[in-house]
Image (cartoon, rainbow, N blue to C red):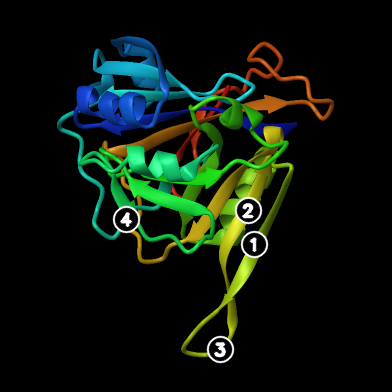
Amino acid sequence: MRLGPIAGATLIVPDLQQALVAYVEQLQLRQLTRERVPRQRALDLGDTALIDAPSATLALANDAPVSLTLIEVPGALPLPESGMRGWWQLILVVADPESAVRSLSTRHWAPQDLADAGSCSFTGPAGERIVLRRSSTGHCDHASAERRPALLGAGLRVADLATSIGFYQGLGLVSGSHQASQLPQTGESEPARGLGELRGEQRIEFIRALSAVPRDPGLHLGLRLISFARSERSGRRLLAADDPSARILAGPDHEAIELV
């Protein structure tokens, strides 16, 4: 089995209308539906507070259908200032980052420093991090053909890189690796970042974040869930009928994962 591509992400927001302004009017995602969260879906997501909550589903520009689901929960806990382990950013590719930056120069988006050349980063209306990168030839071509961004991957804050990468390799990464960075106090090298490659030329970027708060069972604003498709080695996508283990589970840092 091979993991990916990413089929969708679920984001808990304090105000759905303001989040739609940020993602539809400013980031140029396309709204597909607007409805209440069904009871069974709320239970699948692990919190009764989500039952009948207002929600909207938005489309990204990938070849395969990829959706961002916004769920309004005004009473959800804000993310800690030091950050929280687990899912914390979506990585998008756009044809024109400069134009995207201008459209996000509003109160809904707070720019963040980012060391990567050719990328820009913003904090969104729920405290989530959005990274924009320039699309390259042959990769996420729809981002070049449309104004809508395409999803490249997700960022995951972890306590231990080897544990997290090993866990996702067990789920079916195409490949996984980590990079070492030099510690200023000792000069020794220690892994600080990792990369998990998924089907569909997508990725999980692992960030070692010991200072981040461990994720607790409470309902917080920000990224709640990443949904992954699965496929055979031949590339044929698996369905629940092929693999009855399709379910929602938790990763090593209590991040929620859906296998669809």
> Looking at the image, which residue is at 40% across and 50% down?
121
Of 210 and 22, which appears nearest the observer?
22
Question: Which type of secondary structure does the marked residue at label 2 adopt?
Answer: strand
Which disc number belongs to residue 100? none
Q: Residues within 10 Å of mark 3 (few under 14, many from 20)?
A: few
In the rendered image, which residue does mark 3 sit on?
187
Which disc number belongs to residue 178? 1
Question: Which type of secondary structure does the marked residue at label 4 adopt?
Answer: loop
Amino acid residing under circle 2: Leu
Amino acid residing under circle 4: Gly
Of 29 and 80, which appears nearest the observer?
29
In the rendered image, which residue does mark 2 sit on?
195
Residue 45 found in image quarter: top left
Which of the two discs, 4 and 2, labels the residue nearer the N terminus?
4
Which of the two discs, 3 and 1, labels the residue nearer the N terminus?
1
Q: Residues within 10 Å of mark 2 (few under 14, many from 20)?
A: some
Which of the two discs, 3 and 2, labels the residue nearer the N terminus?
3
Question: Which type of secondary structure does the marked residue at label 1 adopt?
Answer: strand
In the rendered image, which residue does mark 4 sit on?
83
Q: CA distance from mark 3 to mark 4?
A: 26 Å
In contact (CB < 8 Å): disc 2 and disc 1: yes
Which of the two discs, 2 and 1, labels the residue nearer the N terminus?
1
Question: Which type of secondary structure does the marked residue at label 3 adopt?
Answer: loop
Is residue 55 found left or right of 88 in the rendered image? left
Amino acid residing under circle 3: Gly
Q: CA distance from mark 2 to mark 1?
A: 6 Å
Q: CA distance from mark 3 to mark 1?
A: 18 Å
Is residue 116 found left or right of 13 in the rendered image? right
